[in-house]
Image (tube, rainbow, N blue to C red):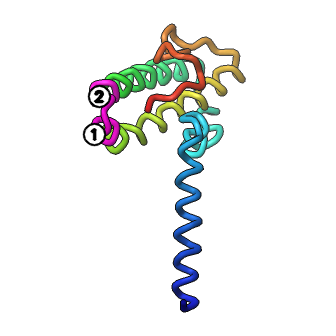
Amino acid sequence: MTENGIFRRMVAAALLSALLSACGTSDDTIGRFLVAPDKFVLYSCAELAERATALAERQRELERLIAKAGDDAGGRLVSTVAYRSDYVSVRGEMNELRTAAAAKNCKLAPGAENPGGRAGGSAVR
């Protein structure tokens, strides 16, 4: 086997292991990588509450769309391709927003604290 073939196999193995390790991580963990730290540091409490309401509504909408896609393999594929990245991004923004609100002692709008009505670490799959 040539050096080029060995290198390709090593790269493929590294990519496969990275993809498989992402399967075990939660939406919140992935979301942290998609949102800039301190994104909401310049927001006032009123702006934080307004953004939290908008994000909570978007998260509920995405959860409805994911549920509507179905639980069979085709539905999961469609929801993953169409909605998953947006859902994870919204969750990451919501976590960063909660952190900023807590640092400023702001109260978020009712329903924005836990938009999906689920426990914090659960994931929509």
Residue shown at the point (54%, 63%) measured from the top left: 15
Residue tagged 2: 70
CB under 8 Å between discs 2 and 1: yes
Q: Which is more toward the observer, 14 or 52?
A: 14
Instruction: Establish if 112 lies above or below 31.
Output: above
Residue shown at the point (27%, 25%) measured from the top left: 68
Instruction: Establish if 56 lies above or below 77.
Output: above
Q: Residues within 10 Å of mark 1 (few under 14, many from 20)?
A: few
Q: Quadrant of residue 54?
A: top left
Residue tagged 1: 74
Counting from the top left corner in percent of width and height, residue 107 is at 61, 11
Q: Quadrant of residue 75?
A: top left
Q: Secondary structure at mark 2?
A: loop
Counting from the top left corner in percent of width and height, residue 30 is at 56, 42
Which residues make up the magenta segment? 66-77
Res 59 label: none
* 71 part of magenta stretch: yes
Looking at the rendered image, the quarter that the C terminus falls into is top left
Q: Residue furthest top?
A: 110
Q: Which is more toward the observer, 19 or 88?
A: 19
* 26 part of magenta stretch: no
Q: Residues within 10 Å of mark 2 (few under 14, many from 20)?
A: some
Instruction: Establish if 10 lies above or below 30.
Output: below
Seen in the image, is 81 located left or right of residue 20?
Answer: left
Q: Which is more toward the observer, 76 or 32?
A: 76
Instruction: Establish if 108 lies above or below 35.
Output: above
Q: The residue under label 1 is which amino acid type?
A: Gly
Principal secondary structure, stretch drawn in magenta: helix
Between the C-alphas of marks 2 and 1, the distance is 8 Å
Counting from the top left corner in percent of width and height, residue 93 is at 53, 33
